């Protein structure tokens, strides 16, 4: 039998009675656990959901231990989506277990799991080569250049990576992703204070499908990076003899966060804004985010300029 969604706890009947049920014949798509006694519950339920594909473990307080993740890896070999965010108690043993037991993983969220090492993350990458979405936000120890080099080498299908506040990441790691993951579409580098223009230039040259880039507080980023992004728009623009489709608002960058990138100047940022029609500065559609950059207040998207011109024309006609 097949199911599609199960939210736990379910108030229908007591917990102990639920744990006695056998769900092994079900192919559940999504299982969300929000139980206070989560670790014991996972230990009890994982063997009963051998065909589970999506597992989201939500914790207000860290409860999950390595034994629970090892049980998941031992029984749930079809797992494709796993959320272990804020599992502060987990160690490298969990990543090693997932590497061997859950090789079909496509989406993995280990944000806030601060105990993982880069050695264990690199090991996981060498086995879980189908990964498309990887959230490493706050994984300061795990998200090193060494780990990112392994990810770039083995996880070539990655489309989304969150490296927020991974302050040890440098250009070496980001460039490894750019060269190894050409289908990269979303990359959050907020708080990666060591990266420079070289990271952005590599992304602009090697990742033609990039749609969202977060550079919040990356204060080493200069105009050189912005002009490389603007130029990539021209380089990657489809021709009428190629795809048969013209450029539209969905091509290229749709979101760019350069907040606190105080070295940038208006002409360079305006060049990026002009190159990507989906980047907006107008009210209600902010997708070019420039908080804390007071010197960039003159940068405006095309529709904001048109709205200003229309308002000016209206005022003149009224007089």
Image (cartoon, grey):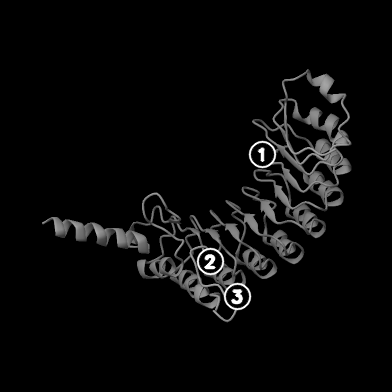
Measured in 3D between alpha carbons, the distance from the residue under mark 2 to the one under mark 3, in whole angstroms, is 13 Å
* Residue at the image position 54 percent from the left and 59 percent from the top: 213
Q: Nearer the viewer, mark 2 or mark 3?
A: 3
Q: Tell me the crowding category of disc 3: few under 14, some 14 to 19, or many 20 or more residues within 10 angstroms, Cα based.
A: few
Does the residue at mark 2 contact the one at mark 1 (Cβ under 8 Å)?
A: no
Q: Where is residue 172 in the image (x, y as percent from the top left)?
A: 64, 67
Choose the circle earlier in sequence order: 3 or 1: 1
Q: Is residue 72 above or below residue 314?
A: above
Question: Is 103 rendered above or below residue 249?
Answer: above
* Nearest to viewer (mark 2 / mark 1): 2
Q: Residue furthest left?
A: 319
The spot of residue 167 in percent (x, y) is 59, 54
Q: Residues within 10 Å of mark 2 (few under 14, many from 20)?
A: some
Quadrant location, the N terminus: top right
Say which residue label 2 marks: 251
Q: Circle 1 sits in a helix, a strand or a loop, which is it?
A: loop
Viewed as shown, does residue 155 lie left or right of 46?
left
Is the residue 10 above or below the residue 81 in the image? above
What residue is at 59 percent from the left and 70 percent from the top? 208
Seen as rendered, the residue at the extreme top is 14
Q: Gap in Å between the C-alphas at discs 3 and 1?
A: 44 Å
Pointer 3 residue: 243
Q: Do labels 3 and 1 touch, CB within 8 Å?
A: no
**Seen in the image, is 298 located left or right of residue 205?**
left
Of the numbered discs 2 and 3, the one sitting upstream in the chain is 3
Say which of 264 and 55 sits in front: 55
Residue closer to the observer: 174 or 300: 300
Rendered image: mark on residue 86: 1
Res 29 label: none
């Amino acid at each position: 039998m097949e199911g599609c969604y199960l939210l736990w706890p379910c108030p229908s009947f007591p917990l102990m009675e639920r744990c006695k049920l056998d769900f092994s014949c079900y192919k559940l798509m999504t299982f969300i656990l929000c139980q206070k006694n989560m670790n014991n519950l996972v230990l009890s339920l994982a063997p009963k959901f051998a065909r589970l594909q999506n597992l989201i473990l939500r914790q207000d307080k860290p409860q999950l231990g390595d034994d629970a993740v090892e049980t998941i890896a031992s029984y749930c070999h079809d797992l494709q989506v796993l959320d272990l965010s804020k599992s502060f108690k987990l160690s490298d043993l969990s990543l090693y277990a997932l590497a061997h037991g859950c090789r079909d993983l496509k989406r993995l969220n280990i944000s806030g799991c601060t105990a993982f090492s880069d050695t264990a993350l690199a090991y996981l990458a060498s086995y879980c080569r189908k990964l498309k979405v990887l959230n490493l936000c706050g994984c300061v120890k795990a998200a090193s250049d060494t780990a990112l080099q392994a990810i770039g080498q083995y996880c070539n299908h990655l489309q989304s990576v969150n490296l927020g506040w991974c302050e040890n990441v440098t250009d070496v790691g980001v460039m490894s992703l750019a060269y190894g993951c050409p289908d990269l579409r979303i990359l959050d580098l907020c708080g990666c204070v060591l990266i420079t223009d070289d990271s952005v230039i590599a992304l602009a040259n090697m990742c033609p499908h990039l749609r969202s880039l977060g550079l919040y507080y990356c204060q080493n980023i200069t105009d050189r990076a912005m002009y490389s992004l603007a130029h990539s728009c021209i380089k990657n623009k489809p021709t009428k003899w190629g795809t048969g489709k013209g450029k539209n608002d969905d091509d290229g960058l749709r979101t760019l966060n350069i907040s606190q990138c105080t070295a940038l100047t208006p002409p360079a940022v305006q060049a990026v804004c002009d190159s990507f029609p989906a980047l907006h500065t107008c009210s209600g559609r902010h997708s070019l985010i420039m908080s804390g950059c007071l010197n960039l207040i003159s940068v405006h998207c095309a529709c904001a300029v048109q709205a200003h011109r229309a308002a000016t024309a209206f005022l003149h006609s009224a007089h």
